[in-house]
Amino acid sequence: MAIKKLKDMKPGEEGTIVTLHGSGNIKHRLIDMGLVKGTKIHVVKFAPLGDPVEIKVKGFELALRVSEAGTIDVDVQ
């Protein structure tokens, strides 16, 4: 069990969301997109300049800013 920030994961890594940090609109938007505790995610790729990061969650692909990805703790498998 290794806890990492989503922004620190490498393409191809998978894990389960443990915690969402932050508050306000950004946290609510992430929750509305299905990024909640216990959700499995797969890091697909980072953009050429490093921002955004593309993840696969619940059967769809989602792009997040690195600043948003830094608020998500993931248990990497």
Image: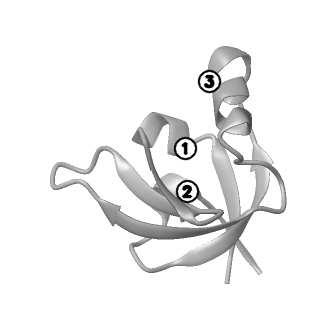
Q: Nearer the viewer, residue 62 or 53?
A: 62
Q: Which residue appears at 65% of the width and 63% of the height?
A: 58
Q: Residues within 10 Å of mark 1 (few under 14, many from 20)?
A: some
User: Is label 2 in contact with label 1 (beta carbons under 8 Å)?
Assistant: yes
Which tag is nearer the camera, tag 1 or tag 3?
A: 3
The answer to which of marks 1 and 3 sits earlier in the sequence is 3
Q: Which residue appears at 67% of the width and 84% of the height?
A: 77
- Residue 18 is labelled as none
In screen coordinates, is 51 left or right of 21? left
Q: Which residue is mark 1?
A: 70
- Element on which disc 3 rests: helix
- Distance between the alpha carbons at the discs numbered 3 and 2: 15 Å
In screen coordinates, is 57 left or right of 45? right
Residue positioned most to the left: 48
Q: Which residue appears at 17% of the width and 49% of the height?
A: 49
**The N terminus: image quadrant:** bottom right
Amino acid tagged 1: Gly
Q: Residues within 10 Å of mark 3 (few under 14, many from 20)?
A: few
Q: Which residue is mark 3?
A: 26
Measured from the top left, where is residue 14 in percent x and y? Answer: 58, 77
Q: Nearer the viewer, residue 4 or 61?
A: 61
The answer to which of marks 2 and 1 sits earlier in the sequence is 2
Amino acid tagged 3: Ile
The answer to which of marks 3 and 2 sits earlier in the sequence is 2
Q: Which residue is mark 2?
A: 6
Q: Is residue 73 above or below residue 76?
A: above
The answer to which image quadrant residue 71 occupies is: top right
Amino acid tagged 2: Leu
Measured from the top left, where is residue 7 in percent x and y? Answer: 48, 53
In screen coordinates, is 64 left or right of 20? left
